[in-house]
Amino acid sequence: MTEVGTRGTSPELPATGQQVVKVIGNLCFSIFVVSVLVFSVIAATYQPPDPWFQTSKAITKSLSATLPNSTFATDDSLLPTGEDLVASPPSAANAGAALIYNNSFPTSSACDPNAPLNCSNPAVLAAIQRFNSKIFRKSIIFISYDTPVNGSNPDECDAAWRFRNRLEKSWRRYRDYRRFRLAPAENCTFEVVRAGKFRSGTNAARRPRRATSPPAVQIPDLDINDTIPTVGSESEFRKGRYLYYTRGGDYCKSMNHYLWSFLCGLGEAKFLNRTFVMDLSVCLAGSYTSTGENEDGKDFRFYFDFEHLKESASVVEEGDFLRDWRKWDRSSGKGQKSNGRISVRKVPTYKLTPMQLKKDKSTIVWRQFEGPEPENYWYRVCEGRASKYIQRPWHAIWKSKRLMNIVSEIAGKMDWDYDALHVVRGEKARNKELWPNLDGDTSPESLVEKVTKLVRSWRNLYIATNEPFYNYFDKLRSYYNVHLLEDYNEMWSNKSEWYNETMILNGGRPVQFDGYMRVAVDTEVLYRAKLRVETFNNLTRDCKDGINTC
């Protein structure tokens, strides 16, 4: 009976199993269909990241791909530097959290709303912090505040703070100070009635270092330390190991070429565990000068952050190094013990690889570049097999903070609330063979037609461009608050802090705000815009590198 009963129920089991299998099959198929749809959407909308803004390995790979025959293509665009490649500091996202303040203060019978405003009252700072956090929370990260001081009127206070821009990946800090009009609120608090523009709170500005200097548009940045490191003594010099490159054919080439070669030498020095002997003199190519001729004798510190370079790599300045070398390589004076000659390994050709020099014990490895171009280019050292061993330290190169202070001030004067238009014209607009549509697509009438469809009316619109005619964009002024780099030329005038500081670096001689500086500032202001309209993505049908290169 038991056996018969078991057989009686057995036909139902396969039917149940089939239903379970069917449900599982339908579920798996549904998951598969959803996965295919998601993958299709991602594949259709995904845009591969720009290698310039990725790791140093990616940027090296990208540049290497353009140099198959050891020649460097002319490129007047601005090469992003290390601060464009590094990740944001771990604490940056939470930097604002350090500014803890109390939103309310205990009620007190002594609280008198008619009493004179005391700017050092913590409630005043709390009100300013609340106001700033509300207005600028999407643009900048506040790091620290100074205690507010009296403004020009009894109901005004000037406050200063240090901040980072959210769109800048480096950890560098900047300074702002503004004038605030405040009014009493409930529970002994205050509220900001009106806030001044960027750096309007002059009473909160730090005093200039030189009392006799002319009034400055910018306050001195006391955080900049680009003094030249020196070797302390003969014993320290002899204990050191140095890599010295003599000037080659890279000198007076484009700035992109210069950096590509300079970072090759810096990378080899790191590979060999040596200190790199660097020439602070830079030759600016004629494409960035007012005369169209190459200009020698520019200081590296005009363009790049020497303080950050010193912290990121082991370097000494060439002039001091050669002076110490000559002084300490001589035999000691009469009655003194001689330490002997300083050992030197002369390397006449780039074909002697860094790997072959790895075990060299000489105090100085001296690479000499005396052949014809392109045999005398520094970056030849890093080609071939050496490219697998030498990593260019892109993280060590940042743009000059003096230039970045100008960038910060321009963005600050627009309260970091602006959109930007990048208009490429110049030689490309005149070259109809490679860019047949560019000139017409960037004409004043065409710009109005296209930009008004992309940018809301009466926004602050910063235009980064190489168009030399200032009034070229006047038609856009009927729709936007237009800003051009030239509108801010007081920031590098002979009364500016930039002018005073660079003149000190230049031995008391004035420094021209040259074409490369203009491109650097223009580009960095462009990067900080909330909305960017690009020439070759939004305005023209032409390709960035010419016809048929899209």
Image: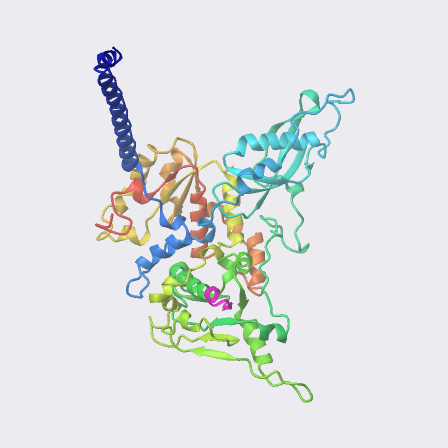
Q: Quadrant of residue 540?
A: top left
Q: Residue at x 50, y 62 (%)?
A: 300
Q: Residue at x 74, y 23 (%)?
A: 114
Span colored in magenta: 269-279
Residue situated in front as seen by the camera: 17 or 8: 8
What percent of the width, then of the height, locates residue 356?
A: 41, 73
What percent of the width, then of the height, locates residue 255?
A: 41, 60
Residue situated in front as seen by the camera: 452 or 18: 18
Residue situated in front as seen by the camera: 114 or 230: 230
What percent of the width, then of the height, locates residue 436?
A: 22, 48
Q: Residue furthest right?
A: 110
Tell whether 477 sits left or right of 502: left
Tell whether 303 sits left or right of 40: right
- Residue 495 visible, this angle: no
Q: Residue at x 27, y 46 (%)?
A: 438
Residue situated in front as seen by the camera: 325 or 254: 325
Above or below: residue 494 compared with residue 22: below
Q: Quadrant of residue 21?
A: top left
Q: Is residue 277 magenta?
A: yes
- Residue 10 visible, this angle: yes
